[in-house]
Every structure is written in structure tokens, then in C-alpha cells.
């Protein structure tokens, strides 16, 4: 009984000149090699899958950290903006008394100058 459907001369070079038992033995060897290769490939794919999952977990953790950092940055920005508004308000409030103080000082200086000028003119 024949285990293959090849016509004489059509068979692959690897099995030319082999009888059916030799062909069957050769096919078994090829299948065993393919099984070993499939096991190696499966193992490699398993390692790649594990690495991919770990990378995914790591990316998830980084995304959480980045979101937390983003939230804290927004809070800090709002605090800085609030403090800037307070500083602007304080500066505006400080300008009014400062202007009033400057006016009073200038009036006093003007009075002193007038007094000196009058004394100089009177005693001359």
C-alpha cells in the first residue's frame, strides 16, 4: 500500500528513491522537528506576551502618575494665579497711601522752602 499520491518522478528531492516505510519515517522526523520548532516559537511568543503585558502595566502606572502630576500642576497653577491676584490687589492698595504720603511730603517740603524764601527775603 502507498502512503502518498506522488507519481514517479514528481516526489520531492528529499524522498526520491525511498520506499513507503522510509517516507513515513522521514515524515515523522519532519513532524517532530516541526513540533520542536513550534514549541520553541510558542515559548518565545509566551515570553513576548509576558513582556508586552509588563510593558502595558508599566504604561498604565505611568499614565496614572502623569495624570496625578497634571492634577497637581493645575492646582499649583490655580494657587499661583490666586496669589498673583492678591499681590495685584495689595499693590493697588499700597499705591493710594503711598501717593498720599508723597503728596504730604511734597507739601511739607514746599512749606519749608516757602518759609526759607520768606526768611531770606525779610532779612535781606
Image (cartoon, rainbow, N blue to C red):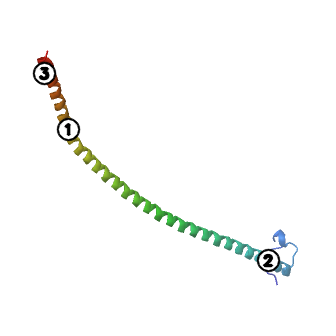
Specify the farthest residue to the top. 124
Q: Residue at x 20, y 42 (%)?
A: 97
Q: How many marks?
A: 3
Q: Quadrant of the N terminus?
A: bottom right
| Front in this rendered view, residue 97 or 82 | 97
Whichever of labels 3 and 1 marks the residue nearer the N terminus, that label is: 1
The residue that label 2 is drawn on is 27
**Gap between marks 2 and 3 measured at Cα:** 130 Å
Q: For this view, does 21 lie left or right of residue 45?
A: right
- Quarter assignment of residue 117: top left
Quarter-wise, where is residue 56 in the image?
A: bottom right
Most foreground residue, 26 or 79: 79
Q: Nearer the viewer, residue 59 or 77?
A: 77
Name which residue lies at 17% across and 25% down: 113
From the viewer's side, name the closer residue of 123 and 44. Answer: 123
**SS label for mark 1:** helix
Q: Is residue 49 left or right of residue 116?
A: right
Q: Nearer the viewer, mark 1 or mark 2?
A: 1
Q: Is residue 8 above or below residue 91?
A: below
> Mark 3 highlights which residue?
118
CA neighbours of label 3 inside 10 A, class few (<14), some (14 to 19), many (20+)? few
Residue at 50% of width from left, 66% of height from top? 61
Q: Residue at x 64, y 71 (%)?
A: 47
Q: If you read the primary sequence from the N terminus, does the residue marked by circle 1 or circle 2 appear first?
A: 2
The residues bearing labels 3 and 1 have C-alpha atoms spaced at a distance of 26 Å
The first of marks 2 and 3 along the sequence is: 2
Q: Which mark identifies residue 101?
A: 1
- The x and y percentages for residue 75 are 36, 58
Amino acid at each position: 500500500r502507498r502512503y502518498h499520491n506522488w507519481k514517479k518522478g514528481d516526489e520531492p528531492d528529499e524522498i526520491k528513491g525511498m520506499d513507503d516505510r522510509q517516507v513515513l519515517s522521514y515524515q515523522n522526523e519532519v513532524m517532530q522537528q516541526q513540533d520542536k520548532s513550534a514549541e520553541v516559537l510558542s515559548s518565545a511568543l509566551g515570553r513576548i506576551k509576558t513582556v508586552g503585558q509588563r510593558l502595558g502595566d508599566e504604561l498604565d502606572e505611568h499614565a496614572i502618575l502623569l495624570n496625578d502630576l497634571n492634577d497637581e500642576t493645575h492646582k499649583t497653577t490655580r494657587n499661583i494665579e490666586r496669589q498673583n491676584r492678591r499681590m495685584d490687589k495689595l499693590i493697588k492698595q499700597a499705591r493710594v497711601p503711598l501717593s498720599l504720603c508723597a503728596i504730604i511730603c511734597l507739601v511739607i517740603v514746599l512749606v519749608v522752602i516757602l518759609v526759607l524764601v520768606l526768611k531770606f527775603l525779610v532779612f535781606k
